Image (cartoon, helix red, strand yellow):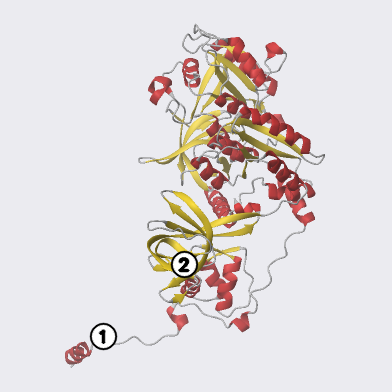
Amino acid sequence: MARSRSGTRGKRGPRKPPRRDSAAQGAVQTLDPAVMGPVEIPATITVKDLAELLTVNPADVIRELIKSGIFATINQLVDRETATLVAGELGYEVGEAAAAPTAEEAEAEAVAEAARPSVFDEDDSAELQPRAPIVTVMGHVDHGKTSLLDAIRSTAVATGERGGITQHIGASEVTKNGRRIVFLDTPGHEAFTAMRARGARVTDIAIIVVAADDGVMPQTIEAIAHARAAKVPIVVALNKIDKPDANPDRVKTGLVEANVVIEEFGGDVPLVPVSAKARTGLDDLLEVVLLVADLQELKANPKRPAAGTIVEAELDKGRGPVATVLIQTGTLRVGDGVVVGQTWGKIKALEDARGKRVMKAGPSSAVVVLGIADVPQAGDVLEVVEDERKARAIAEKRRNEAAAKDTSSGRATLEDLYRQIQAGQAKELRIILKADVSGSLGAITHALDQIATDEVKINVLHEGAGDITDNDILLASASDAIVVGFNTGITPTAKRTAEAEGVDVREYDIIYKLTDDIEAALSGMLEPVLVEQIEGRAEVRQIFRVGKSTVIAGCYVTEGRIVRNSGARVWRGGRVVATDKLESLRRFRDDVREVAQNFECGIGLAGYHDIVEGDVIESFTQQQVSRAAAR
């Protein structure tokens, strides 16, 4: 009988499980919104946390986000405004947002933040010991930076580089009179300033290499500007003095014109004649570096937990994330838990500059670190913490804070200048000035000097002729400066860098407009600008004449959308032949407000009727926005 019942049950199919309530199935217990009362939503929150806060299924939150056109994952962050809309759609009441801090509270917070100790601050002066200086070599291309380092270190770096130009970032050490000197090798002042833009001050001394047969060049002036912006002492290495056409006097005059007064002329900048090829003057250069270092009284505490800066990092296929760190204070040991920017790790191994495994590294030491969870960025600060768990918690908090921050970078802008003046924060407006010709620079600088006020000094950090480049953007980013261009353009890569770094770039073709903007910013009266938005483009495929003068263009929308009553440009042969207003727009017999891509339409312009087949009609709109939004 048992077999028969079993067989019968098998014919009927599997037995249905008994129904359970949602709690038994592990589903979310949804509470009545009226019972919950108002919910408090933070500035940013993940979809998962929002669902838990509202006691609903995450799928319900995602469904509401999709209705609003936001395709979010369960771990994606949404802002408070979006979360409030979702909560409202689900029937929940959201409590009032916390009141914004007053100006006094904000200022107090800023003061407290400024007073907060840096990870590099030394807490016990009794434990301080002299440390080796960290030196960066900068200068114009082909003036012999790598060859000079090659000669100093007696290595063959230059011959192994593509075209003799440094293609990587690293660090190396030399010994002179029993004292260590650490050289930070960079591809130039770009990387030097890129690290400084991330808050890392890794250099104690900057050696500016100038070729005796070439003189002071544009990149030489840029390198000087970057070193001065970082407030780093400068030593000039006059290279290639063994060449027959060497002209040291011309170099010295060029340095004076760049506001670098050498000791020979009564200034404070040492100049050392050297030859990387003949290996002459190198000992003198190292002795001068040590002398400048002695004047700075460089010290660190080797007994404290280590703190340093990432010089370079990469993902090695065999070893995982690998980073070169320059220890600036303390001692780093194998087994230490570390936080590096927004990642963390436990030191598994340390390698010195020669690739030898070491167990620890003290101040002013460059070592390769293994054991970090993710690849950090150059300029990230490494600091030792108590254990791995704390390191991971700090890194996660930093990631969340970075994700929660507004997209604005906090860089200096003219819009913020007046507010900073009122709050007593702004003392000077730093400017990177570029013009089409060098003759314009003096006139603009003089005009800017005339509008400086008692509250704010106008400081031109760097000026030069030519387009705005990546170097200008990086210097502005590191120095919280704005970039002003006069009758000059901006390179595409520099434009992308400016957008990524949040640098304020202003372009002018009339001097008084430039000075008017600066004056308006100082008085808090900066006016909004007109920003143009290209809506779409349509190709003219047929012409219809209505009456004596009216022309309707039969078009096919190839890009974006065509909007009625918008501005219109007629393109022919790659140039604009007319700018008008798009007066009428039809789909078949119907008047419409807009026509989308891949649809046909009829377009009538207000005043231009000489349209021909093959023309492209561009639809655009203009609106007034603040200068910050226009960038």
Residue at the disc numbered 1: 14
Tell which of 161 and 582 is nearer to you.
Answer: 582
Q: Quadrant of residue 432?
A: top right
99 relative position to 157: left or right: right
The amino acid at mark 1 is Pro
Is residue 273 or residue 541 the one in the foreground? 541
**Image vertical order of residue 57 relative to residue 276, above or below:** below
Residue farthest to the bottom, as pictured:
1
Q: Which mark is residue 229?
A: none
* Secondary structure beneath label 2: loop
Pointer 1 with pointer 2, Cβ within 8 A: no
Q: Indicate the quadrant where residue 22 lies.
A: bottom left
Few, some or many C-alpha atoms within 10 Å of disc 2 (few <14, some 14-19, many ≥20)?
Answer: few
Q: Residue 369 location in percent, x, y? A: 47, 37
Residue 74 appears in view: no
Residue at point 44%, 81% (across, down):
24
The first of marks 1 and 2 along the sequence is: 1
Q: Residue at x 53, y 40 (%)?
A: 494
Q: Amino acid at mark 2?
A: Lys
Classify mark 1: helix, strand or loop: loop
Q: Which residue is mark 2?
A: 548
Q: Nearer the viewer, residue 73 or 365?
A: 73
The quadrant of the image that shows the N terminus is bottom left
Neighbour class for label 1 at 10 Å: few (<14), some, many (≥20)?
A: few
**574 relative to 101 in the view: left or right:** left
Mark-to-mark CA distance, 1 and 2? 82 Å
